[in-house]
């Protein structure tokens, strides 16, 4: 370890400051979408259905500071729990760092470009529909199953 190393390599996740921790998120938004699971086979399918608080155009939580009050099922990602949060995509920066893997070139901490995650198709920006809209329409979540661009197989994320 050297002083020249970036913070996510130089320090363990549980030693990051709050600002460092937040800056690691790439803003892909995939953790705010729902996944369906086949009860018999355990196979999982990503959907375009997002949490009612998710802002699809901004690709982020609509009330991040109050998310746990607004959505009690929202799951807090921490250094202690990251290993158990199997609903996160393989590209999730927290998963990568926790596994000792490098951040991708398009990650804003590498590229300096926060829009790259959206421009290059790694995020769900503009592609989701609110769970509230889906529930009011009566349409089944199955009708919104999706394979996200750049994902070659169904998501491993669990149903939320
Ligand atoms: S999946 Fe990970 S990197 Fe993507 S928005 Fe969620 S916490 Fe951030
Ligand atoms: S409440 Fe949680 S799951 Fe819902 S949009 Fe905000 S961060 Fe995502």
Image (spheres, rainbow, N blue to C red):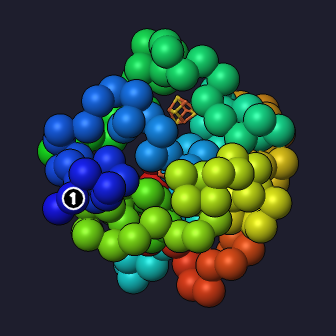
| Residue corresponding to mark 1 | 2
The percent coordinates of residue 84 (x first, y second) are: 22, 57
* Camera sees residue 81: no
- Asked if the beta carbon under badge 1 is closer than 8 A to the nearest atom of ligand 1, the reply is no
Instruction: State left or right for residue 105 relative to residue 69.
Output: right
User: In this view of the protein, which residue sits in the foreground, 66 or 121?
Assistant: 121
Reply above or below: 139 against 136: below
Mark 1, Cα crowd under 10 Å, few <14 / some 14-19 / many 20+, is: few
Pick out the residue farthest to the front: 3
Residue positioned 57% across, 84% down in the render: 153
Q: Position of residue 54 (x, y in %)?
A: 66, 33
Total marks in image: 1
Where is residue 31? Give x, y as percent: 51, 50
Q: Residue furthest bottom?
A: 152
- Seen at 63% across and 59% down, the residue is 111
Q: Could you tell me which secondary element the residue under label 1 belongs to?
A: loop
Q: Quadrant of the N terminus?
A: bottom left
């Amino acid at each position: 370890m050297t002083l020249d190393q970036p913070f996510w390599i130089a320090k363990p996740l549980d030693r990051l400051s709050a600002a460092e921790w937040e800056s690691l998120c790439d803003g892909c938004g995939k953790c705010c979408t729902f996944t369906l699971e086949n009860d018999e086979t355990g196979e999982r399918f990503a959907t375009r259905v997002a949490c009612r608080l998710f802002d699809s155009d901004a690709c982020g939580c609509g009330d991040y500071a109050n998310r746990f009050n607004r959505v009690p099922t929202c799951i807090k990602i921490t250094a202690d729990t990251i290993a158990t949060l199997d609903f996160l995509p393989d590209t999730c920066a927290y998963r990568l760092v926790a596994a000792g893997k490098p951040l991708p070139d398009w990650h804003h901490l590498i590229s300096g470009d926060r829009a790259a995650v959206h421009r290059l198709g790694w995020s769900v920006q503009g592609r989701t529909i609110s769970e509230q809209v889906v529930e009011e329409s009566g349409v089944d979540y199955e009708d919104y199953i999706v394979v996200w661009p750049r994902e070659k197989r169904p998501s491993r994320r669990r149903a939320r």
